[in-house]
Image: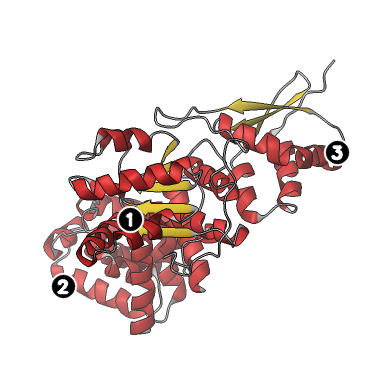
Amino acid sequence: MFEPVTNSSQWNDCLTYISRRVKKQAFTTWLKPSKGEPTTDGAFKVAVANQFVADWIDSHFRELINESFDEVLGKRYDLVYVITGQPDEDQTELELDRTAVPPVVRVSSPENHNLNERYRFDSLVVGDFNQFACAASMAVAEGPGLTKYNPLYIYGGTGLGKTHIVQAIGWQILDQFPDKRVIYATSEKFTSDFINAISDRSITDFTKLYRDVDVLIIDDIQFFGGKEGTQEQFFHTFNALYHAGKQIILSSDRPPKDIRGLEDRLLSRFSWGLVADLQAPDLENRTAILYKKLESEGTPLPESVVRFIADTVTTNIRELEGSLIRVLAYASLKKVPADLEMARKVLSDTVSSRQPNLTIEAIQKKTADHFQIEVGMMSAKKKTANIALARQVAMYLSRSLTDNPLKVIGTAFGGRDHSTVIHACSLISKKLSNDSRLRDSIDNISASLLY
């Protein structure tokens, strides 16, 4: 009779043990997303995203996993990987091939690699939205030119972190292999350098700059579209590097098959290796990104403000971080507390589109629930302290979060006139400056309405 494995908590205990023995980035990228699954056949099942992740974990961490079984669970198990999702049609299975590449000549790494110090793996949040691309990128960084996924082609919408990831690969390679030559360039810079080389009759220097490297990173490759001379030059650069076993890393805002104005011979080469996509982060990952940014800034923010920004900015990471910086900068320059009211004011252009969907009735209900009174008291004539405060807060929020005129707001609160609404809003505004409990109450009510 096999001993059943309940597994979710058991695997989490093993992960805790393993996390203390591997680098944080490696653990976050490969092991943290995995999940334990129950089984009754004596094996230990672990769910992972795809076969590539399973193979990588098994080849790099199996010994440590067995150690965790012995130390944490007191028993060695057979490990079985359960694949939860398959790569899309542009994603191929990844395998290391450390024998098919000719030896690389070592030279000193150039200082003009053009990498931005901000873009490293340590500052990157890894989640479901980018886990495949990050895993592939870490694999390339550990063995540039030694994998079958060459080129590595990463694509995703504007502001989803493509530049961060491809530059992080460059930094990781330089950290581990300081004698490798790495160069990063946008497609525009490559084109500009090529045009200048023609003008200066220095094609030889241009060719040496982009071909005498171990790793070439080209960002936003889609902008080569329609530039026939640049495409011709990049085609020969690509071939020279590829056949020499050098690593090529490309990024774009779309998969190769969707890029217009590029020659078929280039498009086919872009798909030779691995094509990995980036998705928009969900609310949980957007929140994690904001906390990571706050950690680097060394500035705390109330949880309600972080949640508000994460819920308001859903388009891309760049705008998400930009909104956070706007809030922090406003609080610093104006010397005001970074609370939800201030964040809502600073990001009013972003949240305005949400406000027409918010009704006075919804505000009254949430406020009544918070103050533990019946919602009907919002329109009643009763003036007990708790009811009066709840009514004033609801009027204040109705004025702040909706576009309704004062007369409409007053009517919704038992037919009161506009002067009563103005008085209530003024009273609450004054109290907010020195009543932290009231400020927290309004933040919490607002958060529940906006999320």
Q: Residues within 10 Å of mark 2 (few under 14, many from 20)?
A: few
Asked whether, in this view, residue 174 is left or right of residue 339, the answer is right
**Residue identifier under label 2:** 419
From the image, tell me which residue sits under label 1. Answer: 312
First-in-chain label (2 vs 1): 1
Say which amino acid is labelled 2. Answer: Ser
* Label drawn at residue 355: none
State which tag comes first along the sequence, 2 or 3.
3
Marks 2 and 1: CB-CB under 8 Å? no
Residue 287's place in the image compared with 340, above or below, is: above
Label 2, secondary structure: give it.
Answer: helix
**Which-is-in-front pick, marks 2 and 3?**
3
Between label 2 and label 1, give the one nearer the viewer. 1
Name the amino acid, label 3: Asp
Circle 3 crowding by C-alpha within 10 Å: few under 14, some 14–19, many from 20: some
Residue 402 occupies quadrant: bottom left
**Marks 2/1: CA–CA distance:** 32 Å
